[in-house]
Amino acid sequence: MAARAVDLCVALLHEEPSVASVTRVLHEHGESGDLVLREGDVARMRAAAERLRDVLAAPDAGKAAELLNGLLAEAAHPPRLTSHGGTATWHVHVDSHDDAPWEEWFLASSAMAFAVLLADHQRVPGGLCASASCRRPYLDLGGGSPRRYCSARCATRERVAAHRSRTPTR
Ligand SMILES: [Zn+2]
């Protein structure tokens, strides 16, 4: 769930998020069938993604917890089980109902997923890529030292750039 939340954030925080790109991420994470997603939904989901990005950018677990508590108080509803009328296996939702707006579902379920991760690992559940040209949100699933980059690609690029800047030019 947290992986889906971050992948959606990445798609939504792109310069020009599209219905197609967001739909693709939803399908990649198991949403099946025809998704009715409109431009307005994407714009509202983007606003939610910006708030989730703030959680990942938090300096410490305490600040991230405070932000998550605010999001949960605003968007989450009592946990409930649904099978979407028998079309899916039983799973837990924290949005208000099966036809809740996309942005409500996205904000509530993502905040819940991040909160569970924070409680499991006692640290901010992710971060923003340390590469100034990237700044993409990433997930930190704990285990070992905290990550700094979204991907091996960004880590390598920054390492090469740092090496070049140390090498004297002749
Ligand atoms: Zn990156």
Image (cartoon, grey):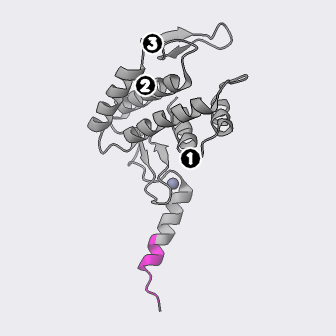
User: Disc 1 marks which residue?
Assistant: 14
Q: Measuring from the top left, give residue 112's x and y in whole percent.
A: 43, 25
| Alpha-carbon span between mark 2 and mark 3 | 10 Å
Q: Which residues are magenta?
A: 162-170
Q: Earlier in the sequence, mark 2 or mark 1?
A: 1
Q: Secondary structure at mark 1?
A: loop
Q: Secondary structure at mark 3?
A: loop
Q: Mark 2 belongs to which amino acid?
A: Met
User: Disc 2 marks which residue?
Assistant: 112
Q: Residue at x 33, y 42 (%)?
A: 58
Is residue 168 located in the magenta-colored stretch of the structure?
Answer: yes
Q: Earlier in the sequence, mark 2 or mark 3?
A: 3
Question: Could you tell whether 60 is left or right of 113 in the image?
Answer: left
User: Disc 3 marks which residue?
Assistant: 79
User: Can you name the residue that lies furthest to the top here?
Assistant: 85
Q: Secondary structure at mark 2?
A: helix
